């Protein structure tokens, strides 16, 4: 069961919360400079830590030196996924665009052509149009969210009042060049299965 708490919580509250968990999952980025903000609390919680991080993230050394758990570099994760791609696999939807970018690199290293052989979908549309091929992604409308946040902040400064305001933004799938219908590899597997069934 997943209990989502989308709002930030304080350092001590985070530590208490993690201390009640069976294990801690740390999700990083394919960017080497990124260090998740809750790494220290994850280590101090004394719970087993499993982290997905860039191999050169400073958090990797922290977790390994503390003996807190296992770190899987995101580039290695992408390559493992690519190497395990079966003929019947059609697509992958990733945690965010950065992971999708790493997956594209891993697939290319195994001569798997996107989208002819395999489709990739990101989530947040931060990198979307800047990758090659241009990434299909679920847009989080970050630009609009930023403008709305700025408007709310300016309004709070001008009025001198605090208000619990919640804004909802619809998401949408932005289709670009990393998705296509029925990959050839999947079609080949289907043909093989049909032949085996007839035989």
Image (cartoon, rainbow, N blue to C red):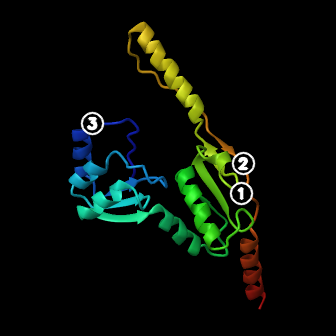
Q: Which tag, 1 or 3, sits closer to the chain's start?
A: 3
Mark 1: which secondary structure? loop
At x 52%, y 71%, the residue is 80
Q: Mark 1 and mark 2: span between their CA atoms?
A: 7 Å
For residue 10, which numbered disc appears in the image? 3
Q: Nearer the viewer, residue 191 or 92?
A: 92
Position of residue 31 measured from the top left corner of the image (x, y, whole percent):
48, 52
Q: Secondary structure at mark 3?
A: loop
Question: Of label 2 and label 3, which has the lower sequence position?
Answer: 3
Residue 11 image position (x, y, % from top left): 25, 39
Residue at image point 62% right, 68% down: 107
Q: Front-most of 54 and 196?
A: 54
Q: Residues within 10 Å of mark 3 (few under 14, many from 20)?
A: few
Where, quadrant-wise, is the C terminus in this rendering? Answer: bottom right
**Residue 4 figure quarter:** top left
167 lies left or right of 12: right
- Up/down of 183 relative to 137, above or below: below
Marks 1/3: CA distance?
40 Å
Q: Residue at x 50, y 25 (%)?
A: 149
Q: What secondary structure is marked by label 2?
A: loop
Pointer 2 local density, CA inside 10 Å: few below 14, some 14–19, many at least 20: some
Quadrant in the rendering for residue 6:
top left
- Pointer 1 residue: 179
Question: Residue 30's x, y, as percent?
Answer: 49, 55
Q: Which residue is mark 2?
A: 175
Residue lying at the far bottom of the rendered structure? 199
Are the residues flagged by discs 1 and 2 in contact, CB closer than 8 Å? yes
Q: Is residue 163 left or right of residue 144?
A: left
Q: Gap in Å between the C-alphas at discs 2 and 3?
A: 38 Å
């Amino acid at each position: 069961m997943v209990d989502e708490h989308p709002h930030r919580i304080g350092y001590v509250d985070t530590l208490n919360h993690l201390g009640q968990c069976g294990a801690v999952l740390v999700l990083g980025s394919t960017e080497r400079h990124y260090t998740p903000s809750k790494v220290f609390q994850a280590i101090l919680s004394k719970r087993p830590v499993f982290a997905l991080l860039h191999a050169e993230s400073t958090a990797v050394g922290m977790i390994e030196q503390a003996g807190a758990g296992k770190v899987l570099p995101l580039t290695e994760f992408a390559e493992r996924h690519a190497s395990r791609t079966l003929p019947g696999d059609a697509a992958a939807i990733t945690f965010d665009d950065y992971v999708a970018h790493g997956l594209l690199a891993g697939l290319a290293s195994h001569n798997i052509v996107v989208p002819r052989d395999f489709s990739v979908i990101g989530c947040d549309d931060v990198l979307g149009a800047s990758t090659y091929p241009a990434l299909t992604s679920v847009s989080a409308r970050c630009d609009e969210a930023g403008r709305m946040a700025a408007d709310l902040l300016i309004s709070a400064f001008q009025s001198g009042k605090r208000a619990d305001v919640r804004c909802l933004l619809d998401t949408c799938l932005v289709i670009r060049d990393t998705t296509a219908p029925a990959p050839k590899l999947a079609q080949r597997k289907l043909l093989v299965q049909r032949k085996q069934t007839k035989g």
